[in-house]
Structure formats: structure tokens, C-alpha cells
Image: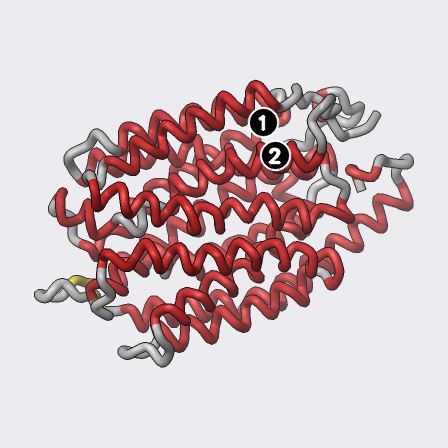
Amino acid sequence: MPATPPLGRLSERSLIFVIGSVQFANILDFMMVMPLGPDFARELGISTAHLGYIGGAYTAAAAVAGIIGSLWLERWDRRTALVVATFGLMIGTALGGMVDSLEGLIAARVIAGFCGGPATAIAMSIIADVVPAERRGKALGSVMGAFAAASVLGVPAGLELARRGTWRTPFFAVAALAGVVAIAAWMLLPRMTGHLRREQPATGLLTLLRAPRVQLAALTTTVVMIGAFCLIPNIASYLQLNLGFARERLGGLYLFGGVVSFFATRLAGRLVDRFGSFAVGSGGAAVLVGVVACGYLVAVPLIPVEALFLGFFLAMAFRNVPVQTVMTLVPGPNERAAFLSLQSAVQHVAASLGAFASSQMLRELPDHRLAGMPQVAALSIAMTLTLPPLLWALERSVRRQRSAAARTAVPATASDQ
């Protein structure tokens, strides 16, 4: 029986757009908190050196939800699971705009993370179910363009809303957006139950964890996320407090970087389909190492802040799209939601470790500047340098596994391959 659920009147391109819209709201919810950090830190009396704990709370909760989701997501209609998770994200985000303490904000971010993490896994499962492997890099590049769109449109808009209103205003705006896209997903997406009708039962979590290719995928995800999230939560604070970058120019900076990322994710997806994840991901890792070294490993950046942002967003796109593409090829059709939920858990545990590690490495000086950024940059570089050999090994493992499956399995549909 085909693994691809029927789309009815919804084309593949339209489905990718709907999934991308859900991801836009989900990613924006996560991304907006970091640039707003100095604003709510000032209003709530939070040390800027502790902002990593707020990001870490979200990712830790998403990790727990990913583990739980890996046990039951294969039993649900994909559409229902996606809508429930997105409504939960709406509630957690709205609560974030109502709190008046660090503890309250952490609790609200835990709720948002508990729902946002599974939403990402479900979205990736839908793409893997519907889009054949030979077009999956391009599709994932489009969906991951939500990251760029969140930077181009969402983050600058959130910063401007906070400037014109208060730091709470963007939380309420994103909560409303999450509600709208959840309703749209329910109305536009067809029921997606093809995975429930497969003759082969869903693979359990423990069985997945014993597979070498899954272990290698988890290790790859870990180094990617630690390398990114030891640095990302602290960028806005570092630019403003250490480099003297004006707060009113921050929105334009994210707009600038997001435009680069918007086009880079699409180009990266096409290049992955043509040259493979290892080649494209290695290039992205090399650029990322250079950017971090020039911008954060030294006390005075060797390149202008605008070029620093352009290079960072470009490198992240050429690193992340190959990684996500090869991850969708690791599981079989009966393993997808469980595997991607497990991957979501690993992603968020690693992101939490990176964020918490940076909070331990950084300290706020009497003049409010951050001390310890070179050490954080060194950790990011060390993690990034391990990515190319891991991608090579993972891509090789996937090819072997798929070749073995082709020799022993009954003929499969294109989306199963």
C-alpha cells in the first residue's frame, strides 16, 4: 500500500506552503525570544548572562516532548497531531506575554517548547511521507525557508512591535498567528493516515535506538545543535552591549540576514539534490567556522557586523538543509514519525546543553558587557569541525541501508524510497 497519503485537491506545492506556514509560526516563536532578550531582561531584572536559561528551558521541554512523541505519534492522523501541537504552542506563547518574573517566563517557554518540538517533527514527517526522495531536498529547502521568512519578516516586526509597545506585544502577536495557522492547517490539509494502514508495524523507540544509522544521526544532530546554540542566544546581547550596535538597527540587521537565508535555503536544497549532503554541508561548515572565528573568537571583529550577519545566515543555510535532508532518508516509512520525534528530542537536548553551557561560560561585567564570548566561539567552532566526517559517514550508512532494503523488500512507492 502506498505510504503517501492522498492529497485530494491540494497539490504537493500547496501542501509544502501550508507546512511552511506552520513552521514559520513555530520558528518565529522560538527565534523572537533571543533578539528580545535585552528588552525583557531590563524590564524583568534578569542578568543578560542568564538569557541562555530561557532558551534552554524551551529546548529542554521540546526534548522531553520529542521522546514522548516518538512513542505515540505514529498512532495519530498527522493532521490532527500537527494542529493540536500548534494550538499548544499558541497557549504557551500567550502565557509568555503575561508573566512578570524570570521563573514565570521559563515556565511559559517550557509549555511552548513542549508543543513546538513535536510540531517540527510532525511537519518533517508529512514532507517525508508525501515528497519523493529525489525531490525532498528542494521541498525541505522550501519548508526551511520558514527560518529565513521568520528572520526577514517576523523578527524585525517583533522587534518593532516591542519598540512601539512593550516586550510583551510580540508574544501576543505570535500567539495569534499560531492560532490562525493551526486553523488553516485543519481546514486545508487532508487527513493523513497512510502510515496507520501499513502492513509493517511502527518501529519502537528502543529498536530505533539500537540501529547504528540512528545512533550516527543522533550524534550528528548533537554536534550541530551544540555548535549553534551555544552562540545564537547571545548574539543580540553581544552586538548591543559589547560592539555598541544600536538597538533601533537590530530589526534591519535581522531583515538583512534573513533575505540572505531565504535565497540560500532554496539554493542549498537544489544543490543537495544534485551533489549530496556531504559536499554541501561541508562547504557550509567551512564558511561557518570562518565567520565565527572572525566575529566572536576575537575581541574586535575582523569584519563589519553586517557582513558577519550575512555570512552567518548563509553558512547556517548551507549547513542545516543538508543535515535535515539526510535525516529524512535515515528512517523507513514505518519509522518516520518516531525517528523524527527522537531527532527532535536530541536536537533540543543538544540545544539546551549549548545554551546552558554558554550561560556558564559567560558573565556580565559591571558595565553590562559580556565576558567569555571567545570561549563560547571556540566551543562552536570545535563542534562545527566535526560535522563533515559525520555527514560523510551518515550518508554512506544511509546508502548501504537503502541498498540492502531494495534487495530484500517488496517493490515500494517512490515516496518510500
Which of disc 2 and disc 1 is earlier in sequence? Answer: 1
In the displayed structure image, the side of residue 195 where residue 66 appears, left or right: left
Q: Residue at x 43, y 38 (%)?
A: 62
**Place of residue 253 in the rendered image (x, y in percent of width and height, measured from the top left):** 35, 60
Q: Is residue 212 visible?
A: no
Count numbered badges in the picture. Answer: 2
Asked if the residue at tag 2 contacts the one at tag 1, i.e. Cβ–Cβ closer than 8 Å, the answer is yes
- Identify residue for label 1: 73
In the rendered image, the vertical position of residue 121 relative to residue 259, given as above or below: above
How is the rendered protein coloured? secondary structure
Front-most of residues 31 and 357: 31
Name the element at disc 1: helix
In the displayed structure image, the side of residue 250 where residue 347 appears, left or right: right
In the displayed structure image, the side of residue 407 where residue 214 appears, left or right: left
Q: Residue at x 68, y 50 (%)?
A: 138
Which mark, by number, is residue 215? none
Q: Neighbour class for label 2 at 10 Å: few (<14), some, many (≥20)?
A: many
Q: Residue at x 21, y 68 (%)?
A: 244
Q: Amino acid at mark 2?
A: Ala
Point out the image quarter for the C terminus: top right
**Place of residue 101 in the rendered image (x, y in percent of width and height, measured from the top left):** 16, 37
**Place of residue 329 in the rendered image (x, y in percent of width and height, measured from the top left):** 71, 47
**Place of residue 127 in the rendered image (x, y in percent of width and height, measured from the top left):** 66, 37
Q: CA distance from mark 1 to mark 2?
A: 7 Å
Name the element at disc 2: helix
Q: Neighbour class for label 1 at 10 Å: few (<14), some, many (≥20)?
A: many
In the rendered image, the vertical position of residue 337 relative to residue 316, given as above or below: above
Q: Is residue 145 visible?
A: yes
Q: Amino acid at mark 1?
A: Leu
- Identify residue for label 2: 338
